[in-house]
Amino acid sequence: MNTQPDILCKLNGIVKHYPILGGVLKRETGKVSVLNGIDYEIERGSITGLVGESGCGKSTLAKLLLKLEDPTAGEMIFDGRVVKKLSGSNRKQFYRQVQMVFQDPYSSLNPRMKIKNIIGEMIRIQGVGWEEEVDRVRSILRQVELDSDVLERYPHEFSGGQRQRIAIARALIVRPKLLIADEPVSALDLSLQAKTLTLLKGLKEQFDLTIFLISHDLKKVAKFCDRVAVMYLGRIVESMPGDRLLNHAEHPYTRALINSIPSGDPSKRKARNKVIKGEVPSPINLPSGCAFHSRCEKRLPKCDKSIPQLKQTSEADHQLACFLMDE
Ligand SMILES: Nc1ncnc2c1ncn2[C@@H]1O[C@H](COP(=O)(O)OP(=O)(O)OP(=O)(O)O)[C@@H](O)[C@H]1O
Ligand code: SF4
Ligand SMILES: [Mg+2]
């Protein structure tokens, strides 16, 4: 029996650097090293979470996955094909197969368009006829739990949660294989956050989707995701099953993130709510060795000299990039 995971998207050594241009001649005077060697696999049918502090490169990775930008180095393989080699109809198909839901449902929907057109234009460009377009828009609206009387209305007439469902409908109507959701619920009220995530989980089954969920909220990704990757300064430092994250993470950075989650229990609040010490180093001037060494309470003498690679631990589906695992 084949027990190999079915991989939808594979990232090999992905690097993204932006040049810093200076002077009258706009010469390159430096670079912003945003992604610094990402090797990662997204399993088909999974919900994979990506967490990390602001500025660590999460949205940049999303842009690369969508092919809105190209990597400086490295290769992405999607559904068995090398993405940078795609051309013609295969390239068009790729752009359909990877869709995105953004954090802000207010700015991601065109305020001057009716809902029927915001969603319908996604399939109109595929040459779908008018009647089929309306049928499919009505059907997708039902699947995101909105009535079809919304068709003639404009985005400003809806609440944040409804707008996010319209954005999800717009992404799903083209039947993508991979849905990237960048902080999809952080602009919503707490009560709507869980509801929207539950809806997404149900849609994943109905649409045979793979979801890549970017979030700051460790508790949410732990609960919602099959697997969670933790990013620090453009590298994945730990990856493990979501249901083991909060109690079994081992990387000092992941542990520090978990310890900084505010606790609902006042007796644990002091022990938990600990802010990670020090500043995140600048991606313009990356530290040597392990990028976390200046903030790490467990650092070893070698930690500022070489970069720990992401390696499998003794636990199933648990990878770690830290020298402590060799001790
Ligand atoms: N076009 C660009 N040119 C230069 N630097 C950029 C560019 N785009 C992003 N960056 C830098 O890359 C870093 C990562 O940005 P990114 O938006 O990917 O972070 P993030 O993890 O999504 O943060 P947040 O959680 O705040 O959304 C930041 O330091 C940002 O300033
Ligand atoms: S490699 Fe060293 S500095 Fe980096 S997280 Fe592990 S112990 Fe800390
Ligand atoms: Mg972001």
Image (tube, helix red, strand yellow):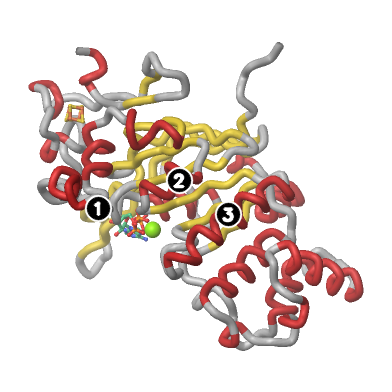
Image point (12%, 28%), residue name: 298
Left/right placement of residue 298 relative to residue 11 reads left
- Residue, far left: 301
**Disc 2 packing (10 Å; few <14; some 14–19; many ≥20):** many
What residue do we see at 68% from left, 76% from top? 118
Q: What element carries label 1?
A: loop
Q: Residue at x 17, y 47 (%)?
A: 267
Q: Name the residue under label 1.
A: 262
Query: Is disc 1's CB within 8 Å of ligand 1?
Result: no
Mark 1 is surrounded, within 10 Å at the Cα level, by few (under 14), some (14 to 19) or many (20 or more) other residues, namely some
Q: What label sits on residue 71 in the rendered view?
A: 2
Find the distance from the CA under tag 2 to the CA under tag 3.
33 Å
**Label 3, on which residue?**
198
Given the image, on which type of amino acid does mark 2 rest? Pro
Q: Which image quarter holds the C terminus?
A: top left
Left or right: 117 with respect to 306?
right
Q: Which is closer to the viewer, label 1 or label 2?
A: 1
Percent x, y of residue 264? 27, 53
Position of 240 with respect to 272 (left or right) is right
Q: Callout 3 environment at 10 Å: few (<14), some (14 to 19), or many (20+)?
A: few
Image vertical order of residue 61 relative to residue 242, above or below:
below
- Of residues 84 and 205, the one nearer the viewer is 205
Which sits earlier in the primary sequence, circle 1 or circle 2?
A: 2
Q: Where is residue 143 in the image (x, y as percent from the top left)?
A: 73, 62
